[in-house]
Amino acid sequence: DPQRALSKAMAHSYEVIIIDRHLDGEFDGVRLVELLRKYGVQSPVIGTAPNADWAEQSIDLVDRLLPAPFDYSELIKAVADLLEDEPHPIIDHPTDFQTQEDDHLKLNLSGLLPFPPAVPEISVQRTPTETPKQEIPIFIATTKQVRQWQPPHIEKYEGPTRVIFTENSDETRSEYEGWLKDAGAEVAACKSGDDVIEATMLGNFDLIVIDLWTSGIDGFETLETLRMSGVETPVIITAGYITKEMVSELLPHRIKKIVLKPTNHKVFMKSIQEAVTV
């Protein structure tokens, strides 16, 4: 599943990622590698496919091509070759015996070298009237003032509240979108978690509403990926059912509220207003 692989790779660190060219999902292996690089995942990638069937423009995205079918030993060798560090140069140090031989050779040769001529010692006498010159520091006055650094001015956003949300049901998604737009918000309605991840990487939002059970990656992985990517936007969770264990798993990711479905306009909009003013 490319969506689940994308969220896992963004939420955790892997030394090697192996991606097949042909995947069952909304996008293929080439698009998955492009998204990984786009979102800053720099782990080495091995691309697999029959006869290494990768698009020519995508070959540079992968570090190794492994034609399929392949056996266990070929896969292990490809991973080992990819992770193998470059050998460090080896510096040979002479042994004690070699050092002694070199010293002995130097002693024998030193007796054959002519002695350097003696240099007569020359003393310099200074007359009493002659005093060494002292350097007088010269200070140059300047009226130029050093300009202190000022942080750049960032205009505060004062437009309508920007809300992005996921909802698996087409009917409920359309209903939520209508409620939010009627309240004056800018709305981005998504069906899957990977759509939310991609949109939040490209734009700014004031609130994220995540359906816990969506197609592709679920709400848990969506929320974890957003937080691991540095997105600190307030989050509301919607769910048809939820347990105490699930709540305990969500709380460390700093969620604002959990809304149980089905819900109505009053409850939904009240939760939105408590998280951010619409």
Image (tube, helix red, strand yellow):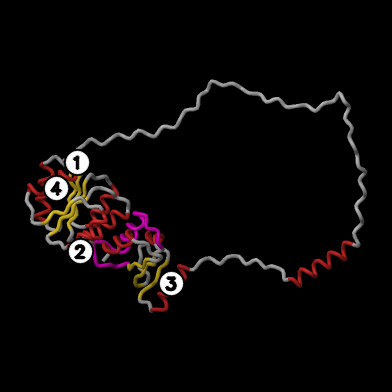
Amino acid type shown at disc 3: Ala
**Total numbered badges shown on the rendered structure:** 4
Above-or-below relation of 111 to 133: below
Q: Residue 85: percent from the left, percent from the top?
A: 51, 66
The amino acid pointed to by label 2 is: Glu
Find disc 4 in the rendering and name its residue.
271
**Of pointers 2 and 3, the one earlier in the residue sequence:** 3
What is the crowding at mark 3: few (fewer than 14 residues within 10 Å), some, or many (at least 20)?
Answer: some
Q: Residues within 10 Å of mark 2 (few under 14, many from 20)?
A: few
Label 1 is placed on what type of residue?
A: Thr
Of badges 2 and 4, the one in the foreground is: 2
Q: Secondary structure at mark 4?
A: helix
Element at badge 1? loop
Which residue bears the numbered disc 1?
A: 161
Numbered circle sitting on residue 78: 3
Q: Are the residues tagged 3 and 4 within 8 Å (C-beta)?
A: no
| Magenta-highlighted residues | 21-43
Residue 245, labelled with which disc?
Answer: 2
| Image-based side of 244 in relation to 77, left or right | left
What's the CA distance linking mark 1 and mark 3?
Answer: 50 Å
